[in-house]
Image (spheres, rainbow, N blue to C red):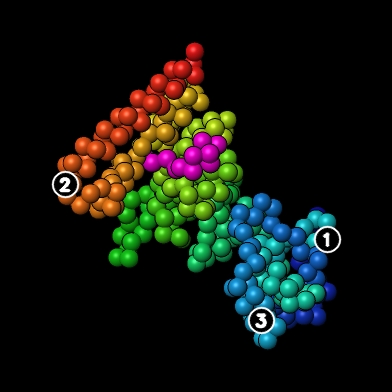
Amino acid sequence: MSEKVPKMDLPSLDNLFTTQKERDEENMEKVQKIPLNKIKDFPNHPFKVNVDDSLYSMVDSIKENGLLEPVLVRPTEDGYYEMVSGHRRKLACELAQYTEIDAVVRNMTDDEATIIMVDSNIQREKILPSEKAFAYKMKLEAMKHQGKRVDLLEETTSGQYGPKLLTTDLIGKMSGDSGRTVKRYIRLTYLIPELLNKVDNATLGFSQAVELSYISEDYQQLINNKMDFDEISPSVSQAKSLRILYEQNNLNEDLIEKTLGELKPNQLENQNIKYRELRHYFPENYTNDKIKSVIQKLCEEYYNRWHNKERNDAR
């Protein structure tokens, strides 16, 4: 019986005629020239690309020095590319009338691309609360999809291990936010657009917005309408009261009106009228107590006239 000849692994033609160094270089990521019209935006990109002075400064720099840092893209099945990092650079190149852009092409899964997209933007100098909110949410979902263990012990600078880090702790670590803060930012994604815009415009406080995010969109719209009509913004205690009323199934339009119509402590303080502002309406020899007495009497007369008119109109 003849012995079985072991199978030999023969080198491919590429391996025969190329060196290992050449093969390694072939597999390395390279900067390529990609037509701008072949690059699509990242789906649901949470970061706004504002046309402002800093963007035009980038345009001037590109015209003078070229693009100093290539963008990062990934290939798509339809022969195009998807932007992962570099939306502002792409727009600046378009404004500079470039037709191509230097890009690193990398094959990535949806989750890998999402994490890189968020990480490359989250440390920007200026970032809106809404941008951070949706970015954190996208990264959290991507990390969960990947199924990676994130409840790991954190290594300290001394080489020891501290408490376990949760997913939200890891997400916020890069931008200096705690896991709790990350969760609170993600709550903002449950706001209706009108209220979220108010957070971005600083006309609605962050803590108040988090409380309102637990209320259904229908009631959020009523709250927003009241805020717009009366040009007011709820305090933290008012926002908490609205949330409690909603969770107890007691919230209605009348209670929204009543809760938001209550004067906040700082507003009550601002109602104080200084006597020196009224002094010129009274004789010089009138004391402050005398002025107060006259004002109270005038207010009482005004109230009686108004109240009688209300009763007559109701008949």
Q: Is residue 231 magenta?
A: yes
Residue found 78% across the figure and 76% down from its top:
97
Kind of element beneath mark 2: loop
**Residue at x 46% of width, y 42% of height:** 232
Coordinates of residue 32 in the picture (x, y in percent): 75, 75
The mark nearer the N terminus, 3 or 2, is 3
Between 276 and 105, the residue placed more toward the observer is 276
Question: Which residue position holds label 1?
Answer: 79
Apparent side of residue 125 relative to residue 107 in the rendered image (left or right)? left
* Residue type marked 1: Gly
Quadrant of the snapshot with the N terminus = bottom right
Range drawn in magenta: 225-236
Residue holding disc 2: 287
Tell me where residue 251 appears, x and y as whole percent: 47, 24
For the residue carrying disc 2, how many other residues have a C-alpha within 10 Å: few (<14), some (14-19), or many (20+)? few
Residue named by callout 3: 60
- Is the Cβ of the residue at disc 3 closer than 8 Å to that at disc 2? no
Q: Position of residue 189 (x, y in %)?
A: 55, 44
Which class describes the residues within 10 Å of circle 1: few (<14), some (14-19), or many (20+)? Answer: few
- Sooner in the amino-acid sequence: mark 3 or mark 1: 3
